[in-house]
Amino acid sequence: MQNHNLRVYPSKTDLPREDQLAWKIAAMAADPVAVDDDVTEMVVNRIIDNAAVALAAINRRPVANARAMAVAHPHSSHPGARGATIFGLPASMRVSPEWAAWANGTAVRELDFHDTFLAADYSHPGDNIPPLLAVAQQMRCNGADLIRGLATAYETQINLVKGICLHKHKIDHIAHLGPSSAAGIGTLLGLETEVIYQSIQQALHITVSTRQSRKGEISSWKAYAPAHAGKLAIEAVDRCLRGEGAPSPIYEGEDSVVAWILDGPDANYSIPLPASGEAKRAILDSYTKEHSAEYQSQALIDLAFDLREQIDDFDAVEEIVIHTSHHTHYVIGTGANDPQKMDPNASRETLDHSIMYIFAVALQDGRWHHVDSYTPERARHEDTVRLWHKIRTVEDPAWTERYHSQDPNVKAFGGRVEIIFKSGEKLKGELAVANAHSLGARPFGRKEYINKFTTLVEGIVSGEEQRRFLELVQRLPELRGEELMGLSVVADLVELSNSSPDGYGIF
């Protein structure tokens, strides 16, 4: 890996393209390096993971509305265009790829249940899969093309997340997703460095938004935002393929994103990128979720399952203190100072960003379910509310240091919990990484990804359709272009709501 130093330059400095971050990412994307076998295996795992969580959310209102909007945009009829498929619908139903990315991206993101990477910032790199798959279907790419594109997309987003903190400036993490999807599409289509460079810059310029989407009363836009970034990335590549350019240099310019939105004129970032000829392996640094909740709660849910076995009476609890990282305390803990995180009437999107609620329910129930754990009835249990309101978080510098560690054997996203009883007794426990993490007690492999899929789609997808999809996706490296249409999964056991262009709205 090579570290790229990123800083701001005045306009009078003619910064060569070759020294700009967007160009270096584009050059990496254009590098025709082979994909390692373990990376290929993980790409397949994440496509299975995405399909699982998308189908589990198939009839939730935001997903149904996104699907209805997409169906109103059938694919173009230009020679060679085949359109793209939508989760839940037959492969014969095809729409314009940017709208397929919109619908599928929303479905994947709705339950906050797919893969994650946390470093200087947050990310869900599986958000790259819907736009890349849509373009691959539209443009007659094959399975090997898709694998190469996704390896680039993951490499780009994960390395941007390692080097550039967005949330410190209250900027949403989709600002890294737009460039990563554009770079991945560039690899997928075998584009020249120049076209990818312009596409990355356009995609960044139009995907900068604030973190209010994940603050206070969190709405369905939390699911729509990454889908929107993927849609915008496809449109940016389309324009640049037609010869259009972009604001440049988008990262280093004196009126750039860095200069006015991030660290400012004195910014100094270091972004790791593979050298020429070096394999793209960043996807292996990411991890998926066993539980449908914000990633920083995963280890704490597992810890709650263990601790509950030693508690006979939850009303005997005086206070619960979760000692954890800066990120966990200030984003999903009491350090966020969001009263909504303690509100029994809060939205599902808010509750899955409240470690106080999550820990209380996990402690009481000994299980976590993507639907049952969030119902209004569950959130309003009087005994749950009492326990929930006894929980607070504090930042522990040791956990913050571990959160930011570059050593995978040290890096941790969990915390230490003290349960203090009215009697004065204390129950303590800690867990660094979730059980499903690669260093956890039960690391996820192909078997676990398939089990997650079959569990989540039960009652939604027939056994025959499940088998068809799983057999096909595991042959991804050898799939021909037309076979990629089969990576859509038909929800053949349920009636889909609002899946017609005759729904509500303008379209």
Image: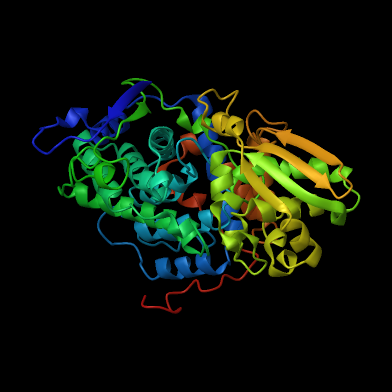
Q: Residue furthest left?
A: 12
Q: Position of residue 236 (x, y in %)?
A: 26, 51
Instruction: Report the front residue among 350 and 262.
Output: 262
The quarter of the rendered structure image containing the C terminus is bottom left
Q: Position of residue 44 (x, y in %)?
A: 53, 38
Q: Residue 143 is drawn in which quadrant?
A: top left
Q: Residue 8 is drawn in which quadrant?
A: top left
Left-right relation of 22 to 56? left
The quarter of the rendered structure image containing the N terminus is top left
Q: Residue 494 is drawn in which quadrant?
A: bottom right
Which residue: 38% across, 55% down?
210
Vertical relation: 242 (above or below) 373: above
- State the count of labels: 0
Q: Position of residue 127 (x, y in %)?
A: 46, 48
Which residue: 79% across, 67% down?
382
Instruction: Report the front residue among 108 and 289.
Output: 289
Vertical relation: 263 (above or below) 103: above
The answer to whether residue 30 is visible is: yes
How is the model colour-coded?
Answer: rainbow
Q: Position of residue 78 (x, y in %)?
A: 25, 58
The answer to whether residue 289 is visible is: no
Instruction: Report the front residue among 161 and 265.
Output: 265
Vertical relation: 114 (above or below) 99: above
Vertical relation: 100 (above or below) 435: below
